[in-house]
Image: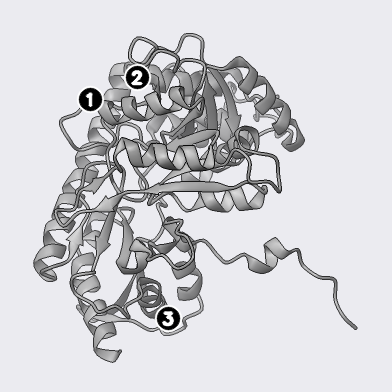
Amino acid sequence: MSKPKLSKHFERRQPSAIRLSQIEFMKRNDNVQDINTAIGNVSLPAHPKLQERMFDLKSSDSPFKNGAIKYTSTVGLKETNAAFLNIIASSGFNTDGLYSQITDGGSQAMELLTVGLCGDAGTEDAPLLLIDAAYTNYNAMASRVGRKTVSVTRNLQEDGKFTLPDRAEIEEIINKYKPNAMVVIPYDNPTGHFYDFASMKMLAELCVKYNMWMVSDEAYRELFYTEDKTSSVWGITDADVPGIEGRRVSIETASKVWNACGLRIGAIITDNEALHVKAVAENTANLCSNAIGQYIFGGLAKENHDSLKKWYSQLRNYYKEMMVRLSNDLKQALPGIIVSSPDASIYSVVDVRNLVNSNFDASDFVMYCSKEGKVEINGVYYTLLVSPMAGFYSVEKGEANPGKTQMRIAYVATPEEMKLVPKLFKELFNAYITRQ
């Protein structure tokens, strides 16, 4: 007897590039240990204020002291929304007139905004404009809700710098596809590219000129390692770009800067009341976000700004040291490899295009590492999990995909484990090349 069919969307769906290597590795039974740098699953302890509430849910001040876990309002707890606004203010930005709603992590914020700002399901009207290499889940979310994406592509230079397309090239894509919203990731995932004020201003000018929403994914705000100032959509006002106010949106999350990936708390912040009202209305179908997670994150609502700035500084020092060391060690281990400049976020892109022939496919190399690759270090066998970059680019059929020779490394393992990454990458890469 035949079984009911799956939807075409489910039939086509493959695991995300950032999860695929882990899924394959979990099928092994040969006692090889993995160092998983494929996904940005931050393993550091959460901010102390979050820990205090997490470990004291039965305290007299806790709303859960009697064991009841009720729905919150759809917009989220006042305290949790205040926490996100306090965080933005701590970076020196004015939060007057901003509207906040709580979401199930930054991921749900992406989905809601894609539904709300892009064309009707099943049409190609008003797509979402991405800047490739772009966080792969934007394409996944768009596909899930029947929206379209279009993109412009950055180039990874030999010196490790990603360069934005020039303004004319971006305008050509805008005029051709007429997107209704542009996504910018100032502390970029996956590239580590830092969007300084000048870059943000240029993109904001395009949003005004072509009447688009400016959606800034600020999951990694304050994680930058240059001498620039903190960058944000909230740092661009009408004084800088007349008309930008009223079209600004940021995606916030507890995951990265606050070391609370599994809390699954995020937010949509906007200076447009109509967008806020409709986004909350849309999310009433989900009832509310995690009530316990909201309460835990709400601990940051009244944290003073000096304390928050100290936290940012500690994280920057922690990540910068690892990123610089790994970048230098990789280039020493494999002369000719390109490693993206350690400017922002918690990722590096490595490109082996100078070391391989045209048949090389990073996705196949990643699967080799996950399924069978191993390297012995001090009597222990390890493999390295990384993300293939092809899925971070949206290329037309027949066009070359820059991600074919690129991989993303996330700085989420311990510093001791991250020190092993260059050796593991080199030996796994050489073993893979030899067997081809």
Q: Nearer the viewer, residue 413 or 109?
A: 109
Q: Secondary structure at mark 2?
A: helix
At x 13%, y 68%, the residue is 336
Q: Which mark is residue 235?
A: 2
Give the residue type at disc 2: Gly
Q: Which residue is mark 1?
A: 229
- Please report whichever mark, 2 or 3, sits nearer to the chain's N-terminal start: 2
Give the residue type at disc 3: Lys
On screen, residue 233 versus residue 158, left or right, reads right
Q: Which mark is residue 246?
A: none
- Quadrant containing the N terminus is bottom right
Q: Up-down: is 360 above or below 232?
A: below
Q: Find the distance from the CA under tag 2 to the CA under tag 1.
A: 10 Å
Q: Find the distance from the CA under tag 3 to the CA under tag 1.
A: 43 Å
- Residue 368 in picture, x, y percent from top left: 38, 80
Q: Which residue is mark 3?
A: 371
At x 64%, y 33%, the residue is 116
Residue 70 can be seen, yes or no? no
Q: Secondary structure at mark 1?
A: loop
Residue 339 can be seen, yes or no? yes
- Residue contact at pointers 2 and 1, CB within 8 angstroms: yes
On screen, residue 420 versus residue 249, left or right, reads left
Q: Quadrant of residue 37?
A: bottom left
